[in-house]
Amino acid sequence: MSRTRRATPSTGSAITSSPWVVVAIGVIVMVVLLVVALGSVRGRRTLPASPTDPAMSLPELPTAAATSPGVTGGPPSTAARPVVPGLSPRSTVLPARPTPAGSTGGPRGEERPASPPPPPPAPPSAVTGRYAVVSSFDGGFIGEVRLVNTGGTPHGWTVRLTFPQGRLVTAWVEGAEQGTFGFDGGVVTYRSGVDLAAGASVPVRFHLERTGTTRPQSCTVDGVTCAGL
């Protein structure tokens, strides 16, 4: 009896008949590829991370260098300047200074500069005067101021008479060189043309009208009140 040969299934038919074999082969291939990829990534040299930009910082304000009194040169002291009350470290406005007692303060507490002292009074003139009425008539009169130089040197002089109203007709120096005169705002002014010699005397006369009185409100010679009023 002849033996019948059993037919063995081929590899292709086995794979086709068993789908899980294909899946297993695919999984193995993917695992191999993943292992190769990880090895290549680890083998690469990683670049250093780019440094981040440093944060911008403001410069510190310099502290005022203080040196010891009487010492020159050497490193400046690190002592900080004392903080003025009412100021922030970066403030540029100084606080108002208090007004000292007895002084007149200006606006916002500022101290006004002290006024200069008044000039010393002028020494009294050596030329003195005495007022008198020479003559009077209807509507006017003639008055005079008799000048005397009591000093030891020649002096110039200025006579002033004040009346509430009226007008000046003329003025002159009796028996001496004439000066200059004027009438403004009720004030008669006569200035000497030459200096009055030491010990000399001279009368200055005025013709006035419609003054209403022969007595002036004031009479001065170089600022000193005349006698005879």
Image (cartoon, rainbow, N blue to C red):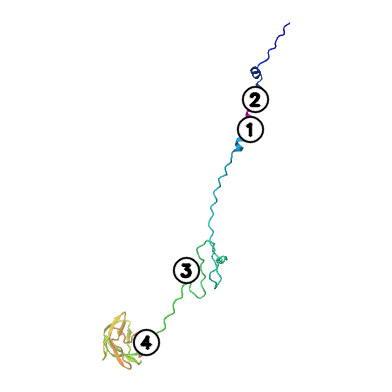
Residue 24 counted in the magenta span:
yes
SS for dot 2: helix
Please report whichever mark, 1 or 3, sits nearer to the chain's N-terminal start.
Answer: 1
Spatial distance from mark 3 to mark 2, Cα to Cα?
A: 101 Å
**Main secondary structure along the magenta-highlighted residues:** helix
Q: Which mark is residue 25?
A: 2
Identify the disc placed on residue 107: 3
Q: Nearer the viewer, residue 119 or 146?
A: 119
CA–CA distance between discs 4 and 2? 141 Å
Disc 4 and disc 1: Cα gap in Å? 128 Å
The residue that disc 4 covers is: 224
Residue 76 locus on image (x, y percent): 55, 66
Three-letter amino acid code of the residue under disc 4: Val
Nearer-N-terminus badge (3/2): 2
Separation of residues labelled 1 and 3 (CA atoms): 89 Å
Q: Quadrant of residue 221?
A: bottom left
Q: Which residue is mark 1?
A: 35
- Asked whether the viewer can see residue 224, the reply is yes
Residue range of the region highlighted in magenta in the rendering: 23-33
